[in-house]
Image (cartoon, rainbow, N blue to C red):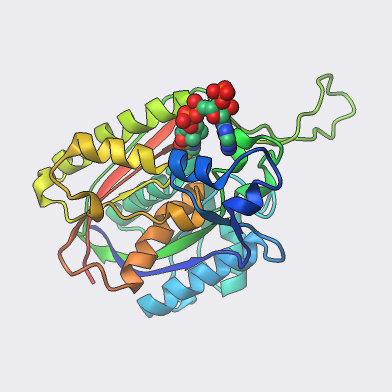
Amino acid sequence: MSFTILGTGMAVPKYSMTNDEMSKIVDTSDEWIRTRTGIQQRRICTTETITDLTVEASLKALDEAKVDPKELDLIICATLRGEYITPSQACVIQSKIGAVCPAFDVNAACSGFVYALDVADSFFSSGKVKKVLVVGFENLSNITNWEDRSTCVLFGDGGGAVVLGEGDDLLSIHTTAKGNPDVLYAPHGENCSPFYKHESEKPHIHMNGNEVYKFAVTSMVRGIRKAVKDAGLTMEDVTYVVPHQANLRIIDAAAERLGAVPRENYLCNIQNYGNTSAGCMPIVLDEANKAGKFKKGDIIAMCAFGGGLTTGSCVIRWGK
Ligand code: COA
């Protein structure tokens, strides 16, 4: 026995920053960003905190699922940087929504949401839980180097949540990691120890875009093929693909290689939000769910990739 999705929710900051606004900060243009990435705007936190937004997304998902926070047996939050170093963001969410269950964070960068689903699956399979809240959220604007045009145009803030109940709609799930702290990383930032003999670095995201691009296309194709095969299905059975929202060109290239699923069934909203890392997938799921796109029995293949380097892919049957 594993899980089924009972409800979804999302939350993004109010401020939507356009490419034209970005071009006032760094030497770039709307044309460059649109044609190289597909991004038109991204949401950036101004007054909101990660706590405000993760709680908002969680409450929306619980409301749709008709689950009281006290019924939750576990909260997992996928994020690489919550409100505090400690407590975890999941514990902060637990206290704000009035839940009483165990809670912890998962850090697998952009693959974090799928990693968190994988952990949830293990808890369901061992019979330890009946209701789980999984949140994927990132506030990347606070670790973005706003002077580096090759990275700052890509990212945004936001995320979402799903409430999971017992069921058999997770058909397969697969995660990978290939440790490589060179091509995509963000240091901690200030070290407070007076004894530490290295210079402090700002906690900015550093990325070799071309290396990550190649990794991304290969990972998406490989990850989706494996998840679909492990589910005992073929690409022809897949109704929708929910790809990680890093770059429309990555999605186009993977879609072309995978075939079978029409390109319009690759659900994309990177135009509006940029890359929100672990937040991407729950946002896409919630927007499609609330738009009434998913029908009971639809087969949804999901694949994410990111820092680590990590990947996560899964196939879920829509059960609502
Ligand atoms: N505006 C204008 N020019 C820019 C720019 C920007 N925002 N960013 C980079 N450039 C310039 C570069 O300086 C370079 O100029 P040069 O030829 O004079 O040196 C030129 O554009 C081409 O740069 P390049 O890096 O080859 O561009 P690209 O087409 O490969 O696109 C990325 C760059 C980052 C968009 C692309 O590599 C990518 O999407 N990589 C994957 C990133 C990703 O998925 N990250 C998250 C993982 S979860």
Locate residue 305: give its quadrant. Answer: top left
Residue occupying image coordinates x 42% and y 24%:
178
Location of the N terminus by quadrant is bottom left
Q: In the shown orientation, is residue 186 left or right of residue 75?
A: right
Which is nearer the eye, 121 or 198?
A: 198
Q: Is residue 161 left or right of residue 84?
A: left
Residue 74 seen in the current view: no
Who's the residue at 40% across and 54% down the image?
281
Residue 64 position in % (x across, y down) = 38, 77
Residue 239: percent from the left, percent from the top? 17, 56
Does residue 61 appear in the picture of this structure? yes
Viewer-closest of 278 and 71: 278
Quadrant in the rendering for residue 230: top left
Of 197 and 12, which appears nearest the observer? 12
Q: Residue 195 at x, y = what percent?
A: 87, 24
- Would you place residue 9 above or below residue 21 in this image? below
Could you tell me which residue is drawn at 16 percent across and 40 percent down? 259
